[in-house]
Amino acid sequence: MNREINGKFVSPGYICNNFGVSRQLVHNWITRDNLINAYRYEGKQGYFICIPFSEVEKLYELKLKKIIKEREKKNKS
């Protein structure tokens, strides 16, 4: 069983709001790029995409690395 099951999931909308990206980009990260893992939960009201919070942390790390790399590149110029 996944250890994230204790309610530590977020929706694609959470990632959109926190990273300033579109839902389509989040969808691409999940399906095409395999950048983040997600689960599909089906219930009585339909289905929901659930993303473990650890994946959000991974995105923050990638974003920080990109910022640092851009600053290093700028400082070399």
Image: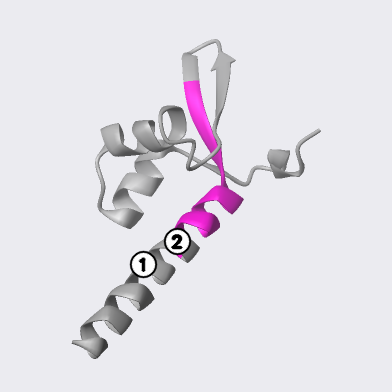
Find residue 2 and report its image quarter: top right
Dot 2 surroundings within 10 Å: few (below 14), some, or many (20 or more)?
Answer: few
Q: Name the residue under label 2.
A: 62
**What segment carries the magenta color?**
48-60
Q: Residue 66 carries which label?
A: 1
Q: Residue 17: x percent and y percent? A: 30, 50
Q: Residue 27: x percent and y percent? A: 37, 31
- In the rendered image, the residue lying farthest to the front is 77
Q: Give the alpha-carbon distance from disc 1 to disc 2, as whole Å.
A: 6 Å
Amino acid tagged 1? Lys
Which residue: 43% across, 69% down? Answer: 65
Secondary structure of the residue carrying numbered label 2? helix
Q: Is 21 situated left or right of 57 in this image?
A: left
The answer to the question of whether label 1 and label 2 lie on touching residues, with beta carbons closer than 8 A, is yes
Secondary structure of the residue carrying numbered label 1? helix
Q: Residue 68: x percent and y percent? A: 37, 77
Q: Is 18 situated left or right of 61 in this image?
A: left
Between 30 and 6, the one lying in front of the other is 30
Amino acid tagged 2? Leu
Between 36 and 32, the one lying in front of the other is 32
Q: Quadrant of the C terminus?
A: bottom left
Between 70 and 5, the one lying in front of the other is 70
Q: Is residue 53 above or below residue 66?
A: above
Q: Is 13 situated left or right of 31 in this image?
A: left
Q: Which mark is residue 57?
A: none
Dot 1 surroundings within 10 Å: few (below 14), some, or many (20 or more)?
Answer: few
Q: Residue 4: x percent and y percent? A: 70, 43
